[in-house]
């Protein structure tokens, strides 16, 4: 005959293991669900990254040709690109905007640089240079048409 105490211990242990199995099954289901969510997030991240890369590539200006070599006259502002890589007239525009007490209009920049801005034909080239500096990340254009330096 089996020892009743031993039978009781076996039954209790089986109940403990059943309970633990149930907890582990629940935890495993949670882990699998989270892994599935991560896989979806990873796919979304990859798609968005590819879209941004495609948009940046299509928005990036084509480099010019100088002496048969491709060069970008106005480079994009990045952490490794210094302001000194800009042509001198663009450097002067940046300096004039930086020295202003606040956001400036094209006429104010022209005055600071000593450029005759009395006529539209003299003002437009300056405005175009400032727009290029905005497109490349060197300046920021405000909704009211004034320009300021980037932080």
Image (cartoon, rainbow, N blue to C red):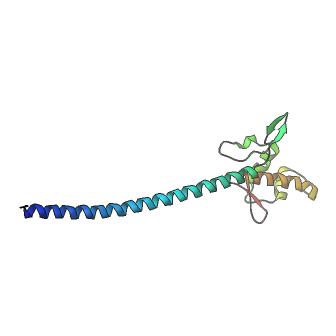
Q: Is residue 86 visible?
A: yes
Q: Residue at x 77, y 51 (%)?
A: 133
- Of 110 and 89, nearer the camera is 89
Q: Picture coordinates of residue 130 (x, y %)?
A: 80, 53
**Which residue occupies the extreme front position in the image?**
1
Q: Is residue 77 left or right of residue 106?
A: left
Q: Residue at x 29, y 61 (%)?
A: 21
Q: Picture coordinates of residue 3 (x, y %)?
A: 7, 61
- In the rendered image, which quarter contains the N terminus? bottom left
Q: Is residue 73 left or right of residue 4?
A: right
Q: Picture coordinates of residue 99 (x, y %)?
A: 74, 52
- Of 141 and 94, nearer the camera is 141
**Which residue occupies the extreme top position in the image?**
67
Q: Is residue 111 visible?
A: no
Q: Is residue 39 left or right of residue 6?
A: right
- In the rendered image, which quarter contains the C terminus? bottom right
Number of numbered discs on residues:
0
- Of 3 and 31, nearer the camera is 3
Relative vertical location of residue 19 with respect to residue 89 in this rendering, above or below? below
- Of 119 and 56, nearer the camera is 56
Q: Picture coordinates of residue 74 (x, y %)?
A: 78, 45
Q: Residue at x 21, y 62 (%)?
A: 14
Q: Residue at x 50, y 60 (%)?
A: 37
Residue 82 occupies which quadrant of the picture?
top right
């Amino acid at each position: 005959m089996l020892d009743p105490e031993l039978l009781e211990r076996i039954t209790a242990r089986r109940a403990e293991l059943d309970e633990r199995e149930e907890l582990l099954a629940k935890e495993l289901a949670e882990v699998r669900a989270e892994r599935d969510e991560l896989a979806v997030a990873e796919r979304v991240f990859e798609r968005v990254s590819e879209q941004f890369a495609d948009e940046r590539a299509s928005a990036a200006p084509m480099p010019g040709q100088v002496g048969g070599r491709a060069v970008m006259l106005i480079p994009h502002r990045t952490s490794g690109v210094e302001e000194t890589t800009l042509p001198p007239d663009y450097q002067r525009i940046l300096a004039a905007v930086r020295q202003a007490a606040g956001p400036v209009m094209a006429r104010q920049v022209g005055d600071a640089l000593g450029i005759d801005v009395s006529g539209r034909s003299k003002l437009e080239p300056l405005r175009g240079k400032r727009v290029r500096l905005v497109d490349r990340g060197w300046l920021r254009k405000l909704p009211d048409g004034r320009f300021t330096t980037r932080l």
